Image (cartoon, grey):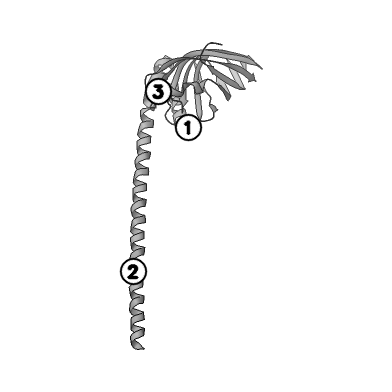
């Protein structure tokens, strides 16, 4: 009888050891696969971040270009460009252009310029749209626009209507910025104008490939 008990205990211990070994082995395999997964996930994230930076403009580059474009308004431009970077990060494209707009409880806006991408692609782009709200006066403006999440091979995505809302005060050689967004594409025009424009306007801006 004692032999049977000892044999039973012996085999129980053997089975327990086997079970422990199997659990350790499974835990080791799981840990190995988890480590590999985390390694490749981090590698992929780092690689995508590098590629993203290669295809976007950094802040110092945009501030320098805007300062040259707006000339004597360089100090104010630096501050307003930095605001866009703080809100949205590095842009994938930018526009240098000019526009004319005016409103008296309703008006218009139209303009044109060139859109630039980091890979050297450069295209003509035009825009127009109503401006409905409590505005007064007219503006002849230079426009420096930052664009986010738009690649040169998908430039057709910008040719659409983008709703905008802005409350602005335009003074002589003043600056204004507003945000426009449709789906994942964000557009932040920075304007420098002459004239008086007070209040809030609400409308949309339509970007086109050709003058319309």
- The residue indicated by pointer 1 is 87
Q: Name the residue under label 3.
A: 63
Specify few, some or many for label 2: CA neighbours under 10 Å numbering under 14, 14-19, or 20 or more: few
Above or below: residue 25 compared with residue 34: below
Q: Nearer the viewer, residue 53 or 59?
A: 53
Residue 178 horizontal side relative to residue 62, left or right: right
- Marks 2, 3: nearer the viewer: 2
- In this image, 58 relative to 183: left or right? left
Relative image position of residue 89 (x, y in whole percent): 43, 31
Cα–Cα gap, marks 1 and 3: 15 Å
For marks 1 and 2, give the one nearer the viewer: 2
User: CB of mark 2 within 8 Å of CB of mark 3?
Assistant: no
Viewer can see residue 30: yes
Q: Give coordinates of residue 173: x percent, y percent.
A: 49, 15
Choose top left, top right, bottom left or bottom right for residue 86.
Answer: top left
Mark 3 or mark 1, which is nearer the start of the sequence? Answer: 3
Q: Which mark is residue 18?
A: 2
Q: How far apart are marks 1 and 2 (CA)?
A: 58 Å
Q: What element carries label 2?
A: helix
Mark 3 burial class by Cα count in 10 Å: few <14, some 14-19, many 20+: some
Give the x, y percent position of residue 160. 55, 21
């Amino acid at each position: 009888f004692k032999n049977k008990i000892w044999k039973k205990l012996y085999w129980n211990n053997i089975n327990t050891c086997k079970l422990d070994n199997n659990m350790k082995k499974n835990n080791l395999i799981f840990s190995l696969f988890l480590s590999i997964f985390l390694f490749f996930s981090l590698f992929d994230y780092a690689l995508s971040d590098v590629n993203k930076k290669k295809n976007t403009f950094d802040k110092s580059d945009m501030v320098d270009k805007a300062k040259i474009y707006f000339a004597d308004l360089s100090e104010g431009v630096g501050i307003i460009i930095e605001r866009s970077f703080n809100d949205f990060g590095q842009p994938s494209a930018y526009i240098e252009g000019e526009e004319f707009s005016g409103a008296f409880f309703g008006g218009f806006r139209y303009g044109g310029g060139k859109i630039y991408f980091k890979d050297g692609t450069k295209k003509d782009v035009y825009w127009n749209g109503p401006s409905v709200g409590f505005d007064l006066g007219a503006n002849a403006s230079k426009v420096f626009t930052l664009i986010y999440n738009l690649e040169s091979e998908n430039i057709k995505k910008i040719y659409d209507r983008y709703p905008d809302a802005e409350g602005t005060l335009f003074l002589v050689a003043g600056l204004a910025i507003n945000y426009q967004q449709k789906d994942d594409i964000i557009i932040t025009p920075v304007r420098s104008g002459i004239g008086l424009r007070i209040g809030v306007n609400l409308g949309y801006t339509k970007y086109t490939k050709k003058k319309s």
